[in-house]
Amino acid sequence: MTLDRELAAAFGYEAETREIPPPDVEGLIRGGRTRRRRRNVRRIGVGAAAAAVLVGGGAYGVAHVAPGDPGTVSVPPATSVFEPSEPAAVPPSFQYLDRTAIEPGTYRMFVGADPAGVKIEADLTVTGANWFAGDQPVVSDGGDTWAGVGVYQPDALARVAPCSGDWQGRDASRTPQGLARQLVRLPRSTVVQALTPTEAFGHDAVHLRLRIDDQCPRPEWYQIAHGPAGVRGITYSRHPKEVLIDFWVVDLNGTTVVVDMWHQVDAPTELVGRANQVRDSITFVTGE
């Protein structure tokens, strides 16, 4: 017999004569119970932490409910900071009023466009009675005295002949300083307050005040400017009256626009105050 066969026979005999010990059943059971207890401890710890969070949240809700029936407590539902908010309602268009009486409320006016063609609009809020929609909003005292507010982007300003029948204009400057200097030279006007740098409507601006003789042969009217939003006129009384008008030439992110507020020289303080309130409500809207 070779050495290899002798070794194989020896290993075979060793395997046949070795006794395999029986499994330690009780030990296995004890080990399984130990592992199960450890898993349960970990689960209880996680559950307790979650329960603490829930109890804390519930206590917060209960502490903030309004007093009511002591037998019932309603906890306000949780809200997520990631829930989208409701979009704000767009105000009705001023241009759609078509020269009718204006009901109190907020309206959106078309103003013009920036050099890229993006539309510029303005929101304003009207309160009280006797407001009417021309190309711009106007208000009366119930008689023959008027005031008004304007928001526009001039393409041309009155030059020599300001009345509508034979109106002559010149191209409006595209810079606030240039446009303000042109407004100072409006026909039949006198400077009451000179050009003053200021801030208005959240933007840099130039302010000035003029006194204008708006007499024109009937049925014509004095026109300050022409622009995309229409004609800016200030003649409304049946009898000619001089007009005081404030201009704010606004630098709207590189685009020049105008806000004005005018009233006849004999307008009562209450009427002027109502026009001022509407002017103060103006906010610009771009890119919507």
Image: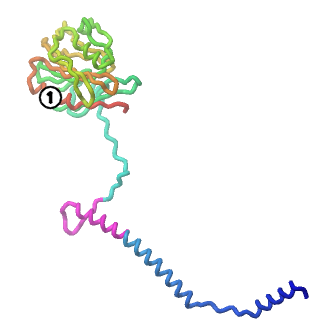
66 versus 107 height, above or below: below
Report whether residue 123 is seen. Answer: no
Tell me if residue 239 comes above or below residue 150 in the rendering: above
> Image check: 72 left or right of 20?
left
- Residue that appears at 14% across and 23% down: 140
Task: Decide which of 214, 143 is in the foreground and name it.
Answer: 214
Q: Hey, which quadrant is residue 168 in on the image?
A: top left
The residue positioned 59% from the left and 90% from the top of the image is 24
Give the image quarter of residue 227.
top left
The residue segment tinted magenta is: 50-76
Q: How is the image coloured?
A: rainbow
Query: In the rendered image, is residue 113 in sight?
Result: yes
Q: Position of residue 78 (x, y in %)?
A: 32, 58
In-front residue for pair 235/61: 61
Q: Using residue 113 as the reference point, say whether residue 264 is left or right of it.
A: left
Up the image or down, 73 lies above or below 284; here it is below
53 part of magenta stretch? yes
**Residue under circle 1?**
274
Secondary structure under badge 1?
Answer: helix
Quadrant containing the N terminus in the rendered view: bottom right
Residue 230 locus on image (x, y percent): 30, 18
In the drawing, does residue 123 fall left or right of residue 117?
left
Return the x and y of residue 62 as percentages of the image width and height.
25, 64
Question: Is 65 within the magenta?
Answer: yes
Query: Which residue type does callout 1 highlight?
Result: Arg
Q: Residues within 10 Å of mark 1 (few under 14, many from 20)?
A: some
Image quadrant for the C terminus? top left
Front-most of residues 241 and 188: 188
Residue in the image at 31% along x and 39% along y: 89
Residue occupying the far front of the picture: 3
How far from the left and from the top, in percent, is residue 271? 12, 25
Q: Looking at the picture, tell me which residue is in the foreground, 268 or 259.
A: 259
